[in-house]
Image: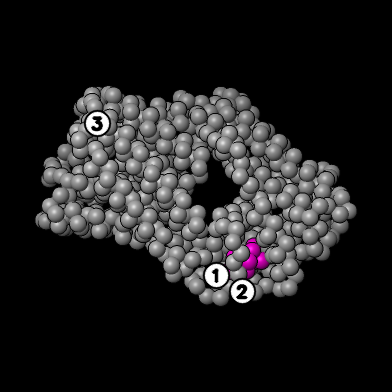
Amino acid sequence: MSSATLHRLPLAGVLRLGRPSDIWFKPALSVVAAVAPPNLILLALGRLDLAMYTMAGSLCALYGHNRPYAARARVLAGVVLGMVGGLAVALLAASLTADPVVLVTVGAVMAAVQKAACDATRLGPPAHVVLTFISSASLFAPQTLAQVPAHLGLALTAGVWAWLVGMAPGLLRPHGPERRATAQALNAAAGYADTRGTGDGHARARASAAAAVHAAWQSLLAAGARPDRTRRALERLLVRAEVALAAPADTDPARLRAWARALRGTGRIPRVGATAEAAGELLGVDAELDLPRRPLRHRLAPLTPLTPLAVRTATGCALAGYASLALGVGRPYWALVTAASLHQANVTLTWSRAIQRVVGNVVGVFLFAALVPLAHLHPAVLVLCTLALNFGAEALIGRNYWLGTVCVTPMALLVTEFARAQDPAELITERVADTLVGALAGFVAAVAVTNRRAGDRLEHASTTAERARENAARLLAEPHPAPGALESARRTLAAALVDLRATADAASGEWWQRALPEERVVLAERSGHRTLAATVRRQGLVPWNHDQAQAPGRHQDDGRDRDQGRTTEDIRP
C-alpha cells in the first residue's frame, strides 16, 4: 500500500456481542468485594464525599485475573502503587493551581504515560483507562496540600484491601489461572486439528492455537520455578497441544476438548500417555530457562515503539479537554477520559472503539435517568446502585465494550452524587457533550499522528522470526545438539512467530505508512511453523514423516505444498 492509502472504516460487526469470558464473574465479584466495605464504612461515618479516594484503591481489584497467583501478587502491587502515584500527582496539581487549561494539560500527559506503561508491561484489561479515569477526575476535585496525605492514605488502604481480594481465590484454587490457560490452549489446538492443517481457515486457526499455547507456557513459567505436581501435569497436557500443532491430521480434537473440560473446577488433572509424560519432563523443565533476567535497557525497549501511541493519547486528550472547556462543560475530564479510552493498536481499531464508546455512553445516560430517582431516595440506595453497576460493567464488558460502558456511564455519574445531589439533566447533557467531543478529538488525533514505526516493527519482527527459524533449523541438522538447545530454540521461534502475527495484525490496520512486506510475513510464518513441527518430530513426540515435512533449512514454496496459493487468509491468518 502507498503512504496515502486509507483503510475502509468498519461498521458491520462493531456492536456485535461475543461470548462472555470463562471467568466473567471473577472481576465482577472482585470489584464488588473491593468497593463495598470502604463505601459502606464511609456511609456509616457520613463521609461518602471521600469515596472517590477509596475507589481509587478498590478498582485495582479489576486487574490480573488471568495471572498465576505468584505473578498476580506482583502485578496487583504494581497497579496499586501506580494508581496511588497517579493520584498523588493529580492531587498535588489540583492543590497548586485551579487553572483548568493547566489541569487538562497535566491530565493529558499523565494519560499518555499511563497508556505507554500499561502497553509496555502488557498489563491487560482494563489497562490504562481506570488509572486515567481516577487521576483525571482527581485533577478537578477541590483540594489543599494539607488534605493530600490523608486522601492518599485512604487510596492506599483501599488498595491493600483490593490486593487481598484479588489474591483470596488462590486459597481455594491455587492453580486456577494455569488450568484455564492450559484448557484454552487445548481448545485452540483442537480447533486447528479440526482443519486437519489444510481446511478452510487453517492459517488463522494455526496462528490462534500457537498464540494460546505460547500464552499457556508463559502462564506456567510465571507461576514460579518451584517444582509442583499439578504444574508438571499441566505441562504434559501442553505438550499434547504442541503435538496437535505439529501433526493436526493425526490428532483427535475431541480428546483435546475432553482434557480441556476436565481442567474446569478443582477436579483431577487428566493423565496422558507415557510418551507425552516423557516429553513433558523434557519440555517442561527446560522451559523454565526460557525467561532469563534481561538487562534493564532491554526491559525498557518496548517503550520506544509505543511513542506514537503515547503522543496520540496525549494529543487526543488535550484536544478533548480544551474543546470541552471551550464549550463551557464543567467536567472536562469526562472528554479527556473518553479520548484516552479510544486509542488502540491502530487507527482501524480506534475507530471501532470510538463507535462502541459513543453508543454505550448514550445508552448509559438513559439508564442513569431511570436510576437517579431511585438513588436519590437514600445514600444507602445510592451506594447499592453503584455496586450493582460495578458488577454489571465487569460482567458485560467482555461481550462487547459498548455493553460494559452502558453500566460504566451511570456508575460514573452516580459517583459524582456522593458529595452532593446534582441536577440530572445537567449531568446528562454534559456527559453526552463530553462523549461526542472526546470521541471526535481522540479519533482525529489517531489519524493526524502517524505511526510509521508500525512498518519498521513488522520488518524487525520478520527478521527476528527468520533468524529464530534459521537457528532451529541449524540445530535440527546437527546429529546430536546440546541438551536443551533444541528446546530453547523451539521456544524462541514459537515466541517470535506469535509476536510476528500480532505485529502484522496491528500494522495492517494502520494508516499513512509505506507498503507492508506481506509476502515476507507469509513466507516467514509458513517456514517457521514447518520448522516448529520438525522440532516436535525430532524430539520423538510424533513420527517423522518425510512426505509431510520438507527439510527445515530450505524454503520450498513452489506452489505444490499444502499452503499453496497466496489467498487473503494466507496473508492475514
Q: x, y (%) of residue 476? A: 83, 51
Seen at 83% across and 45% down, the residue is 474
First along the sequence among labels 2 and 1: 1
362 versus 188 height, above or below: above
Q: Depth check: 527 or 87 in front?
A: 87
Which residue does the numbered mark 1 point to in the structure image?
263
Principal secondary structure, stretch drawn in magenta: helix
152 versus 232 height, above or below: above
Q: x, y (%) of residue 187? A: 59, 63
Secondary structure at numbered mark 3: helix
Which residue does the numbered mark 2 point to in the structure image?
270
Bin the neighbour count of mark 1 within 10 Å (Cα to Cα): few under 14, some 14-19, many 20 and up.
Answer: many
* Badge 2 vs badge 1, beta-carbon distance below 8 Å: yes
Question: Which residues fall within the magenta stretch?
Answer: 230-238
Q: x, y (%) of residue 245? A: 70, 58
Taking the view exactly as shown, the residue that stands out farthest to the left is 377
Secondary structure at numbered mark 2: loop
Q: Can residue 394 be seen in this view?
A: no
The disc labelled 3 sits on which kind of residue?
A: Ala
The disc label shown at residue 427, or none: none
The disc label shown at residue 94, or none: 3
First along the sequence among labels 1 and 3: 3
517 versus 11 height, above or below: above
First along the sequence among labels 2 and 3: 3
- Picture quadrant of residue 2: top right
The disc labelled 1 sits on which kind of residue?
A: Leu
Q: Can residue 130 be seen in this view?
A: yes
The verdict on residue 235 being magenta is yes
Seen at 73% across and 43% down, the residue is 468
